[in-house]
Amino acid sequence: MFARLPGWARSHLAALRILLVFTVVCGLAYPLALLAVAQLPGLHDRADGSLVTDTRGRTVGSALIGQSFTDGDGNPIPRYFQSRPSAAGDGYDPTSTSASNLGPEDVVDTFDDPATRDADETRQSLLTQVCARSHDIGAFDGVDGRRPYCTAGGVGAVLAVYHAGPGYTGPITRVISVDELCPAKPFLTTYDGVTVSCRTLGDDVAAGRQVLVRGDAPARPAVPADAVTASGSGLDPQISTAYADLQIARVARTRGLPAARVQSLVAAHTTGRALGFLGEPAVNVLNLNRALDALTPARQ
């Protein structure tokens, strides 16, 4: 019967049969097969999102997705271990997983000019973000928050150096602290005998020679790198053992627990390297904080 149909009709019928076959295979059989595999022991929890509940049965998060432990104003809660920063949306937004896409050469802050009617143009460079986070963590946890190329106030220690001649030649005529907006006091008084001034909104800092000042920070900062930088996904639920160890004294003091007891909980929630050699040991922050609440429940 189909042989009597015109060629175009046979082609359309063949395409329809292929569509129906692939719809059944790819749209029904394959997803159902994956769902069945996901229910196998050892895979079921991950497939369902590894949701975590509290003692009242309420879902409080996922063991696979990080979250912040802050109050309503965004301030870190001292009784909890803190997660690493996140660039996903407003922070740990699974619908906006991403990195900041800022690189090591991003050292110049952008300041908003209130005279313009544009939206707020303020943007911190990656260097200032790292410096500010390290400064704040140092104060929060009572450790040395200094880092190379950071000012004592927690911004990038960057200078724009202007010369009299072309191509950065000739004597220095002016020096600006790039990331310190007036009326801030510059982190350096002079540079090569020239007074350092704070930055004004009208300064063309790109015209100056960029100089980063290392300062007197230790070669190995007390605040580890994962405490001041976001992960590639923005959703990592773990922190390094170094960042966890840094927080033990503060959490123990706030909760009235012996530091050794908190240290043992950190060790219990530390996972080793994948396959024994990939990556570094890490601590799941949500599970660790849940274990702490089981010992000293949070105030409701």
Image: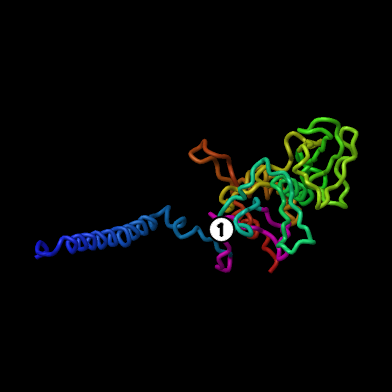
- Along the viewing direction, whichever of 49 and 199 lies nearer the viewer: 199
Residue 94 quadrant: bottom right
Residue 296 against residue 199 in the figure, above or below? below
Query: Is residue 153 visible to us here?
Result: yes
Residue stretch in magenta: 55-82
Q: Amino acid at mark 1?
A: Ser
Q: Residue furthest front?
A: 166
Q: Position of residue 13 (x, y in %)?
A: 20, 63
Q: Position of residue 217 (x, y in %)?
A: 79, 37
Q: Residue at point 78% right, 41% down?
A: 158
State the residue at coordinates (85%, 47%).
Answer: 198
The answer to whether any part of residue 249 appears in the image is: no
Query: Dividing the picture into quarters, in which one does residue 173 lie?
Result: top right
Question: Which x, y percent locates residue 183?
Answer: 88, 52
Query: Main SS of the magenta segment?
Result: loop
Colour setting = rainbow
Instruction: Indicate the quadrant containing the N terminus: top left, top right, bottom left or bottom right.
Output: bottom left
Of the pair 189 and 114, the residue shown nearer to us: 114
Label 1, on which residue? 96
